[in-house]
Image (cartoon, rainbow, N blue to C red):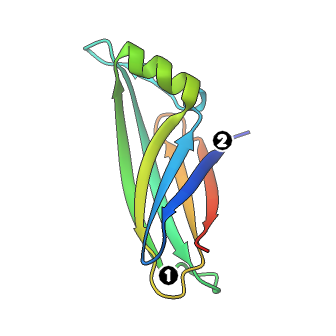
Amino acid sequence: STGWTLVAKLWAKAPNAALAVVMDGHEITFGKNAKGEQDAVVDMLMLAFGDQPAPLNQAKRTVHLSLKPAQYDLMMKGGVRVTVNVDAPAGSQRVRVIARDAASGRVGSVDVPLK
């Protein structure tokens, strides 16, 4: 499989949807930096949809992770949590969050209803 599963929880509704997204740390490619920390980059795209196929709005975010050993161990156990925000204009019914591991190209997505 080329994808992984994301879990998202909506905690603020339209017009500014805020989502807590959890990614499985085992499915993100980490490498050590010069400080001995675990590094990874995840590109994220958030799309707000109404009742039409084309998105009403979109936002991009690149997440750079540089984790000390204890932080890395916690994220491997509980997942990598990221908070994302997207403008959800009037008529928005759901937000799709797409995440891409920059190193491997692996992609995962989740749709979150706004109601």
State the quadrant of the C terminus.
bottom right
Residue 103 numbered tag: none
> Judging from the image, what secondary structure is the residue with disc 2 in?
loop
Return the residue at label 2.
4
**x and y percentages locating residue 21 in the rendered image:** 52, 48
Return the residue at label 1.
56
In this rendering, the answer to whether 62 lies above or below 19 is above
Residue visible at 58% across and 64% down?
Answer: 96
- Disc 1 to disc 2: CB gap under 8 Å: no
The Cα–Cα distance between marks 1 and 2, rounded to whole angstroms, is 25 Å
**x and y percentages locating residue 52 in the rendered image:** 63, 86
Q: Residues within 10 Å of mark 1 (few under 14, many from 20)?
A: some
Mark 1 and mark 2 lie on one chain; the one further toward the N terminus is 2
Residue visible at 61% across and 46% down?
Answer: 6
**x and y percentages locating residue 25 in the rendered image:** 55, 30
Residue 13 horizontal side relative to residue 70, left or right: right
**x and y percentages locating residue 108 in the rendered image:** 62, 48
Question: What's under tag 1, amino acid-wise?
Answer: Leu
Q: Residue 53's image quarter?
A: bottom right
State the quadrant of the N terminus.
top right
